[in-house]
Amino acid sequence: MESSSSKVWLFRTITVLLPFVILLLLELVLRGVGFGQSVPLFINNPQAPSYLLPKPDVVSRYFSDPSAGPDVTIETNFFLAEKPKDGLRIFVQGGSTAAGFPYGFGASIAGMLDYRLKQSYPNREVEVINTALSAVNSYTLLDFADEIIDQKPDAVLIYAGHNEFLGIMGVGSTYSAYSSRSANLMFLKLKNLRLFQLMQSAYDGLTSANNDIKNSADRQSRTVMAKVAKHRNIDINNPLFSAGLEQFNGNMTLLLDKYKRAGIPVFLSTIASNLADQPPFESTHIEDEFLPMLRKSPEQWSAIEQSIIEKQATKYSSAQAYFLLGKAQLSQKQFSKAKLNFELARQHDLLRFRAPLEMNQIIRQLAADENVTLVDAERNLTKVAEHGIIGRSLMLEHLHPTIKGYFEISNTFYESLVTSPQLPKVVNKVGRFAAQSELPIFDAEIYKGHAAIAGLMADYPFTSEPTSKRLPPVTNAAERMGLKMVQNKISWLDVAQAELELANKNKQPKQLAKAAKLMSDAMPYNAEFAFQAGSALIYSKQSAQAIRYLSRSLKHKPNYINAMLAMAHANAELKNLKQAKHWLLEVKKIDPKNKVVADNLNELEKALNANK
């Protein structure tokens, strides 16, 4: 009897497990034949395996057919595969603003902080790594978290919130195939399974859901903003509006909880956008009889007309009317009223490329957690904005900052980092003026960025139909190089080398050191670039910083005599006489007759004896 009962239970167990065994075998077969893909966030640098970099096209992990996705990438930035014992490693997450669009890495939060923190911690290996890219939102941030945690960061910085409605998997986005947040979260968990990818490919092949993206050559030539907007009418009473806020709050809560459990502090920033100089993209209309007033310059409105428009704006929640009302009040120097109406214009803009005010409210609530530090970038941008209203001096268009705007955001992060008890104490705090006078970006890159903005604004939603891009005028040598970058005739490295040569020719030590440092930090595995940076820093009286680059050079080229001699020079300048002697003796082992050693070793020994 017991035997019969055991057989029944065995049969039942096999019946239950058999489908899972079959699915597992199918998964293994699909992997074995090379079907599908797993797209990692970080990959090895083929030129130097001791370094990793974020995979530029990591966004392809969200599309069964990568050509159906947006053409966005993470700009190349390297970090050591094995974190140094005394290293300070920070990751940046977010969308296009966090990534430094349109200027690139040098203007990004990661780029500006990396350059400044290396000066602040001259005796540490500092790595500020960018994982931000355009068109992504909290789903991508959450999806990247485990891989970032594996890299043992000392902190994670987040600037995000604008793409919850129209970014990848956003509630109103073209790039969203799933109907709910729970479905999107399930997709993130299943996306690497080959069986899931097989079903996804079959579904995509049987439906025309992506045909408007994949099959149109015209759409392929359009900007990401022009492609991404599926729902163009999301007012504050639309269920999609609430869904976007709930999505952000829910995903960010999960994300912050991951970092908290891993013991990684998070610096979470409020976000900002253009209020004074960006008209709403889409708006409800006011009554027809009052439309002619909106066509008049707001500065010309009479008091009666202004009162009428104010009533119409309130009655119809008209973003356009609120915006023009703000313009009228700005001209009358009623700055507080103007700011309020500009904020209402953004709030009621039906095309959700700018985050509504609730997004910063959520960010402030999330930052109440003990593991999270609030970085109030919006507040600080408002402080430096003309009349306290963020406009064209800080924003290029609707939300991407100018160079000045990017500096203010990075400066807000910097101040939060260097005063945080969760990070090592700063050795050399770099003040605001010093940092602002030496930004890690070349003028050619700035021209290229402005050209990119010209292209962005030549298409929807800035124009109803795509128009010809008008490039900025070229007035000097740097802009000519920038134009060549736009035309893909020269690379960033060509620009950096040209800047290095020009600074050397004109005997400009600070500019020379800047160019040399940027070249070495862009390619940290290049021993010659590191030596150039170290030498330039000694020449510009910055020997403390030189040690980092010369150590890097010797790491990749251990018997590099010139780097050893430079190490001796830098240490002598810093009064580290024992270390200076050490490096001279190391050179002597390789080259016993080295003239520099012969000329300096005796004098160095005399100085050491005198100090005893």
Image (cartoon, grey):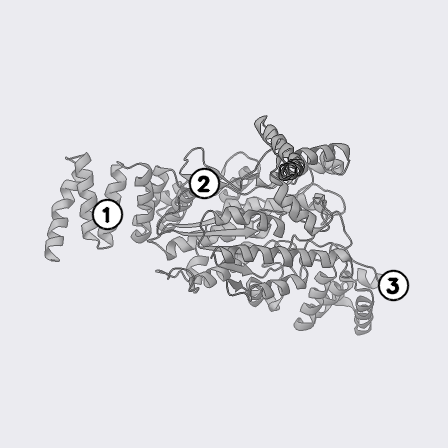
Inspect this view and state whether residue 259 appears: yes
Residue 190 drawn at (x, y percent):
63, 42
Residue 559, by quadrant, is top left
Q: In the rendered structure, which amino acid carries the disc numbered 1?
A: His
Q: In the rendered structure, which amino acid carries the disc numbered 3?
A: Glu
Mark 3 element type: loop
Asked if 140 appears above or below 333 in the picture, the reply is: above
| Mark seen at residue 287 | 3
Marks 2 and 3 sit apart, C-alpha to C-alpha, by 59 Å
Marks 3 and 1 sit apart, C-alpha to C-alpha, by 77 Å
Task: Give neighbour class at mark 1: few <14, some 14-19, many 20+ (Cα, 10 Å).
Answer: many
Q: Which residue is mark 2?
A: 52
Q: Nearer the viewer, residue 8 or 17?
A: 8
Q: Does 159 sit left or right of 553 as displayed? A: right
In primary-sequence order, the first of circles 1 and 2 is 2
Task: Give neighbour class at mark 2: few <14, some 14-19, many 20+ (Cα, 10 Å).
Answer: some
- Locate the N terminus and report the quarter of the image it occupies: top right
Q: Nearer the viewer, mark 1 or mark 2?
A: 2
Inspect this view and state whether residue 334 appears: no
Residue 207 drawn at (x, y percent):
77, 35
Outermost residue, right side: 289
Marks 1 and 2 sit apart, C-alpha to C-alpha, by 32 Å
Task: Give neighbour class at mark 3: few <14, some 14-19, many 20+ (Cα, 10 Å).
Answer: few
Q: In the rendered structure, which amino acid carries the disc numbered 2?
A: Leu
Residue 269 drawn at (x, y percent):
55, 60
Asked if 32 appears above or below 345 in the picture, the reply is: above
Q: Which residue is mark 1?
A: 569
